Image: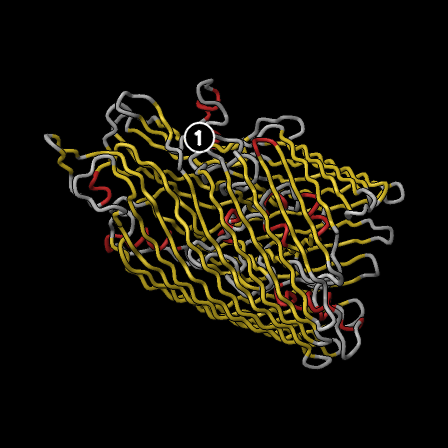
Amino acid sequence: MPAIMLALGYQLQASEVSSDSLDHIQLEEVIVSGTRAGVETPVSYTNISASEIQKQNAARNIPAILQNTPSLVAFTEDGLGVGNTYFRIRGTDATRINVTLNGMPLNNPETQEVFWVNLPDLSNSLQNIQIQRGVGTSTNGAGAFGASISLQTTGAQSEAYGEASTAVGSYGTFLSNIAAGTGILDNGLSFDARFSRVFGEGYVRNGKVNHTNFYAALSHYTDRQLIRLSYLKGVQHTGITWEGVSEEQMQDEEYGRQYNPAGEYYDDAGNRLYYDNETDNYYSDIVQLTLSRELNRRLVLNAGLSYNYGYGYYENYRYNRRYSDFGLEPQTIGDSTHTRTDFVRQKMMENDFYVANVGLNYIDGPWKLTFGGMYSYYDGDHFGKLPWIKHSANIPANYEWYFNVGRKSELNFFTKAEYQLNQKLSLFGDLQYRHIDYRFSGMDDDLMDLTGDFTYDFFNPKAGISFRMNDFNRFFASVAVGQREPLRADLKDGIKGGGVNPIQPERMIDYELGYHYEGAGGTRLSANFYYMDYHNQMVQTGKLTDIGYKLMENVKDSYRAGIELEASVPLWENKVRLDANATFSRNKINNYIAYFDLYDSPDNYGWVGQESVEYGTTNISYSPDIVSAMGITYQPTSAFYVNLLGKYVSKQYMDNTSDDSRAIDAYFVTNLSAGYTFKKTALGTFNLQLFANNLFNREYVANGWAATDRFEDGSSINYIGYYPQATRNYMARLTLTF
């Protein structure tokens, strides 16, 4: 369990600093204070320090590093956590989790999620992370709905430093990392930079990665001000692994658990081959300018500008496809006319994301106030090209078969207030207003016209109370409203062909009741009850539009309810620490109706229409009833530690029907890590880390997808794709600090 950080916001430290001076650490914290919860904030949250990040950092993406935090389920497509990696919190997916970097929004405005593979090795550039579960506090960015994650990049160190790190592991995984910083110079300036490369083959076939990350920051400190210009660049080339593997294929010797059908095709002789450039590629540039200034002893200004540029595409082989799928005429070559052929396609995107925000933190006696606002503008192009066509008579090279644009702007304001009634009782209030304007136009990849203009206005109030019984025991309660607009994919599929889009925004009321104990000896215990009451939750029911597109639909009544338990107990004079967390939950849709494609028979497969089935109350997909983690850490000295962690996730359904034939089995996986810091040498200080993941060699699946076809005789066929996780694998990392 991550250790609790120092107080996060300047407002929590005001009594500890002089009226006219802030040290550089406190200035760092001021930058993110508007997006984070403090000690008395009545929300459920977890803080993760730099040392805890480092202990879990085995060349893996952020979801894998966070996998042992409460209510979080992480999974990866490549099986290792180096390629495409994702997570859910309380069963909510990435599109409902708000992420900020130094207080700036990081979620893609159209998909509303963060693709962590596009930010390779980001963890090495972070100094801390906060996870808020539930609606949480208002933030600068997309509305938090299921959870919020606040990332803070590394700040300047007091003295000059250098670092070099190398990691090698199973399946050809290799990481190299170098970093250096000037420390804070006499003139207040500091410069920090970090560069890393990650290579690997992945656990599944074509799970290869080739990632590059660069981070640089120029900072200037005075007694009352911090201004920082930072730049983060990510380049990723990752093999496509999203198709999954069926249970039959996993058990077949010809295929097995590591099989991946991506790029599969057949030559003229009928031999099965694989296209060797079945890849996802993305280039990301993030520039941020942040300012934190103490205007007077009561008032602190935070302001920021951010520009995110992204360009990417995925390339894959399309075997025996119709020319008409790409808006092309049949091709006549010699005496042969081809209506079908093989293609290599690239589906591409290029986007610009501009953000400006400002916030004021005001402290006066029992009052702690935060006022903030943000404006963002997103311009995204989506287009597709054909770099190769097997039979082509007169088709231009890199033929572009579709192009569409999406433009989304948001204006939001929020006010947060904490009032300390007395030494025991404090009140919390939070008001947020969001205005979103989103429009798109052009032609989609299926050659259907896209024209849409959507406007949303949301008002999200929050209120809570915190009661400190004594120095050790604290209780809190809160209620919060969260609202979320539909995704680009939800909207476009509903309007194609001039259809009317029925999808409505989601609304949720989040009730939280918590208890926290922190003993003088370092023992920490907590319990948090939550009830997340949804209205119009967006789910896929299988229903189609009149022209055959799957619709995201609103289900009127659904909820998530559970209890989160955490414990951290030091033993043997703090040489041993036991950490554990467990979430027990119920996640239900009331009066659920599913729609299935109906065919005449498995032999003919003539489409008849759709069949609806009423299921009553069902389990929400990908929402396990139990998620737990337990670890034991032995650290007899500051130089050496051994950590054993176990993670349990109960059964998950892959759709909303609660059908056991479309479910992921429960799993328990154990990881072992150890580290030793050698005495300082003439070169510097060496730190060695060893990781053994899936220590007991379990063959388990962490995620998947399911679809079902039904037939007029009452039979059905399930199509399922699983994402197997790697069996036992290892990693060793050596770091030199000087």
For the point 72% across and 39% down, the residue is: 689
Percent x, y of residue 60: 60, 42
- Residue that sits furthest to the left in the current view: 335
Horizontal relation, residue 334 to residue 298: left or right: left
Image height check: is 569 above or below 350?
above
Q: x, y percentage for residue 428? A: 66, 68
Q: Is residue 617 left or right of residue 163?
A: left
- In the structure shown, which secondary structural element does the residue marked by tag 1 occupy? loop
Q: Pointer 1: residues within 10 angstroms few (<14), some, or many (20+)?
A: many
- Single out the residue that lies furthest toward the top: 253
| Quarter assignment of residue 26 | bottom right
Residue 154 left/right relative to 396:
right
Q: Residue at x 55, y 46 (%)?
A: 88
Above or below, 14 against 444 in this view is: below
Q: Nearer the viewer, residue 29 or 588?
A: 29
In front of the other: 195 or 88: 195
Toward the front, the furthest residue is 682
Q: How many numbered marks have been drawn onto this rendered protein structure?
A: 1
Q: Residue 11's spot in the image, x, y percent?
A: 71, 71
Tag 1: residue type?
Answer: Asn
User: Image point 26% across, 54% down: which residue?
Assistant: 443
Q: Nearer the viewer, residue 36 or 125?
A: 125
Does 468 sit above or below residue 195?
Answer: below
Which residue has dot 1 on it?
260
